[in-house]
């Protein structure tokens, strides 16, 4: 999960759809369906596009608030072959936020198996990510 602040590239609904679908591909996920909508009117404070991509492995959801130039990004996955970090990195690259806060949540049924920690260690060496609780 991530929060993106002061995004430089505020996407249209169609642009956001393309970004999120590509993020799924970058994550080695398999797209099942796409749902998209615009909330509010352009002059509204809470106006913005939202895209949810359902993938075999779970889902990716991105919501943008144009007025605030703020976006939330949720990349949920189950499966050892998918890489949620790649999807978040792609969305980060496309939206270009001035600040990004990332969160990791282990929802596995066996907390002894911490896929995020294993992934973190695999990707970044021996550094341990305290936020996972693993």
Image (spheres, helix red, strand yellow):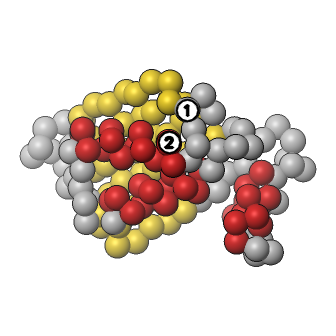
Within 10 Å of disc 2 (Cα), the crowding (few <14, some 14-19, many 20+) is many
Residue 6 seen: yes
Q: How many marks?
A: 2
User: Mark 1 or mark 2: which comes first in sequence?
Assistant: 2
Give residue 59's quadrant in the image.
Answer: top right
Residue 58 appears at what percent x and percent y?
A: 60, 33
Q: Is residue 36 left or right of residue 110?
A: left
Residue 95 appears at what percent x and percent y?
A: 33, 59
* Residue sitting nearer the eye, 80 or 105: 80
Label 2 belongs to which residue? 24
Q: Is residue 83 left or right of residue 62?
A: right
Residue 48 appears at what percent x and percent y?
A: 24, 44
Q: Are marks 1 and 2 in contact (CB under 8 Å)?
A: yes
For image coordinates 77% across by 51% down, the residue present is 115
Label 2: which secondary element: helix
Instruction: Kindly report the distance in space between the C-alpha atoms of the residues bearing marks 1 and 2.
Output: 7 Å
Label 1 belongs to which residue? 30
Residue 48 seen: no
Disc marking residue 54: none
Label 1: which secondary element: loop
Residue 128 appears at what percent x and percent y?
A: 77, 71
For image coordinates 54% across by 62% down, the residue present is 102
For image coordinates 51% across by 49% down, the residue present is 26
Residue found at the far right of this picture = 112
For image coordinates 86% across by 49% down, the residue present is 113
* Residue sitting nearer the eye, 106 or 46: 106
Question: In this rendering, is residue 27 above or below 5?
Answer: above
């Amino acid at each position: 999960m991530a929060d993106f602040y002061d995004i430089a590239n505020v996407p249209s609904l169609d642009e956001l759809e393309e970004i999120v679908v590509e993020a799924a591909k970058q994550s080695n996920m398999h797209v099942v369906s796409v749902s998209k909508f615009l909330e509010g009117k352009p002059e509204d404070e809470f106006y913005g596009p939202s895209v949810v991509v359902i993938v075999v492995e779970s889902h990716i959801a991105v919501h943008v608030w144009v007025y605030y130039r703020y976006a939330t990004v949720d990349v949920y996955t189950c499966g050892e072959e998918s890489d949620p970090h790649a999807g978040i990195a792609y969305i980060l690259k496309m939206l270009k936020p001035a600040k990004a806060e990332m969160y990791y949540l282990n929802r596995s049924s066996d907390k002894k198996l911490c896929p995020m920690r294993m992934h973190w260690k695999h990707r970044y060496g021996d550094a341990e990510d305290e936020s996972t609780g693993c």
